[in-house]
Amino acid sequence: MTERATKRPEGFAKPTYWSNAPAPAPQPGVQHDELSPTRYGDWVKDGIAIDFS
């Protein structure tokens, strides 16, 4: 098994676009009254459930 690298190699220079700022806090999601077809895998068309899988 190869050991995991835990230190940066010598001579490593951090790119200028890297930041030390923390990641932004996640925004609350949008709640919908209907069930999400992407979550449950079905779409309803003319009252008939259609499964694309």
Image: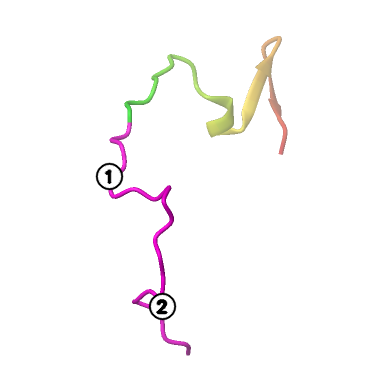
Q: Which residue is mark 1?
A: 21
Residue 48 quadrant: top right
Q: In the picture shown, does residue 47 fall above or below 8?
A: above
In the picture shown, does residue 27 fall above or below 31?
Answer: below
Q: Quote the CA–CA distance across marks 1 and 2.
A: 23 Å
In the depicted structure, whether residue 3 falls above or below residue 21: below
Residue 51 screen position, x and y as percent: 70, 31
Left or right? Give the position of 46 relative to 41: right
User: Which region shows up in magenta?
Assistant: 1-26
Which of the two residues, 25 or 44, is positioned nearer the viewer here? 25
Left or right position of 32 against 45: left
Q: Residue farthest to the top?
A: 46
Secondary structure under the numbered disc 2 in the rendered image? loop
Identify which residue is drawn at 65% across, 22% down. 43
Quarter occupied by residue 5: bottom left
Q: Amino acid at mark 2?
A: Pro
Confirm or deny contact between disc 1 and disc 2 (CB under 8 A). Answer: no
Residue at 58% of width from left, 30% of height from top? 38
Depth check: give the residue in front, 44 or 28.
28
Residue that appears at 37% across and 25% down = 29
**Disc number at residue 9?**
2
Residue drawn at x 39%, y 60% is: 14
